[in-house]
Amino acid sequence: MAPTTRPTFRRSLALLAGAALLANTGFTGLVHAQGTPPMNGPASVADLAQGLLNAVVNISTSQNVKDDEGVGPAPRAPDGSPFQEFFNDFFNKQKGNKGGNHNVNSLGSGFVIDPQGYIVTNNHVIEGADDIEVNFADGTKLKAKLIGTDTKTDLSVLKVEPKAPLTAVKFGDSSVMRIGDWVMAIGNPFGFGGSVTVGIISGRGRNINAGPYDNFIQTDAAINKGNSGGPLFNMKGEVIGINTAIISPSGGSIGIGFSVPSELAAGVVEQLREFGETRRGWLGVRIQPVTDDIADSLGLSSAKGALVAGVIKGGPVDDGSIKAGDVILKFDGKPVNEMRDLPRVVAESPVGKEVDVVVLRDGKEQTVKVKLGRLEDSDQAASNDAETNNKGGVINPDPDENQDMDEPDDQQSQPMPDGKGKSDQATPDAANPKNVLGLSLSVLSAETRKTFGIAESVDGVLVAEVAPGSLAAEKGLKPGDVIVEVAQEFMRSPEAVAAKVQSLKQEGRRNAQMMIASANGDLRFVAVPME
């Protein structure tokens, strides 16, 4: 009933609108309106599309997959159903084929960037494929070879061997595109072949948790299944994005599509063409967000930048140029407005480049020079850190609180600051804990290390108890944690913590920034309110 009444309701509205028009304009006015030539619609993009369609290709892949012997029971038709015999015959044959192989096919899009046959698409379009075929607008089909792929940005480069030069397109500058600018997407939705859709840029810098370098362009130009890997053009016919993902409950376009910006993609594609792999810059630090509380504890006017929670031993900045507790505000002239900005700008920088980094240290901005390493070497550095940690003398950042700037999922480590002596020997304070900000503090001793299972590599002031409901408890502090630093100053005793907190209060600070080590040496920064 609903599907028939809804159109009727709309037609009634249309009739009422027409009656209102007659009443308001009168018959003479209506005749005049009908005699007026209709106004032109939006400018046509036909000429632009015509010159680009041949550069956009359909990519079909096949993969030989072994049948899963653990498949559940076959569906049954109801007893007595006219289809029962058909069902039984079909699924009995399937049982006979159990343990065999079958091909899985998929479709996607891509575009030619070089007349000699280099093609860009998404990694997820060709991932795991045994056979890749590129279909051109004129019906030509060519087998493709995978040149290189990058899972972090979901980009791949293919190569075909054409008999004649191909129509190619070039990358434009996505950084100059603004929200509201017109864009055009061309792809192969649902296997229909070259299809054109037009829309605007509806958002920039989107983070959809697809990878460590998310910086997507959002567009309402329709992107559907099969559009993945296709280009997003500006009105000059330049590729300013590579269509990669959509948000949709049904799998079809609802006007929320995402494209990898050309400012990120162009460099990745060039490296894949030249080396068959990516070669990203690496700074060798672990970072965490600068929250409002941390910003206040550091004297920052607003929460911005990336807080360095650890420096990788053997990494590019293990020379002391950047230290734990620094806040990176600018990298190579580019502002770091939030933590996730830093991994991207570092990764986009050439290996071996010397760059200026602006950091906030001890309440003052200063510029340091660093020489970037190669991200792909970070695994070896992590391995070396792990070996050092097993021998003692290393504190690992907390993987739940911090983010490795170059590899967010790796757990890498940072040496203790030089010149920090251990506090193993018991003192009278050990038996008389001092209370600060809801924390019952004590010195580290052989006995307390054993009680809380604290590693020998960890040094500082022990948190023996945390008052329930206190602000420190709300920040996640717990018995067995160790206060390593307060306001970037190493803490040797409970009295030193109390004195530093009192000093910060006198300076008008509302939060005390603390470097906290867990019992096993994981390191994080916490801003504890002092009010």
Image (spheres, helix red, strand yellow):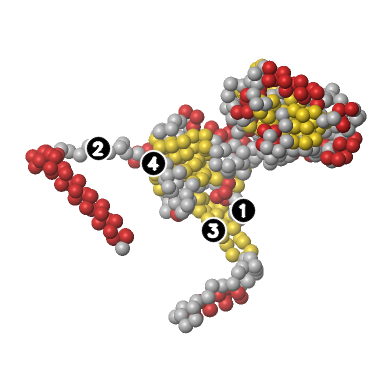
Give the distance between the C-alpha atoms of the residues marked 2 and 3, in whole angstroms.
Answer: 44 Å
Read off the residue under disc 2: 40
Residue 299 x %, y %: 64, 20
Amino acid type of the residue that numbered disc 3 sits on in the rendered structure: Asn
Mark nearest the camera among 2 and 3 is: 2
Q: In which quarter of the image is the N terminus?
A: bottom left
Give the distance between the C-alpha atoms of the residues marked 4 and 1, in whole angstroms.
Answer: 32 Å
Residue displayed at 57% across by 49% down: 124
The image shows a total of numbered marks equal to 4
Question: Going by the image, does 448 lie left or right of 339?
Answer: right
Read off the residue under disc 1: 128
Residue displayed at 58% across by 24% down: 302
Q: Earlier in the sequence, mark 4 or mark 1?
A: 1
Amino acid type of the residue that numbered disc 1 sits on in the rendered structure: Gly
Q: Which of marks 3 and 4 is nearer the N terminus?
A: 3
Q: Nearer the viewer, residue 484 or 277?
A: 484
Mark nearest the camera among 4 and 1 is: 4
The numbered mark at residue 105 is 3
Mark nearest the camera among 2 and 1 is: 2
Amino acid type of the residue that numbered disc 4 sits on in the rendered structure: Val
Q: Earlier in the sequence, mark 1 or mark 3?
A: 3
Read off the residue under disc 4: 198
Q: Quadrant of residue 8?
A: bottom left
Mark nearest the camera among 3 and 4 is: 4
Helix, strand or loop at mark 2: loop
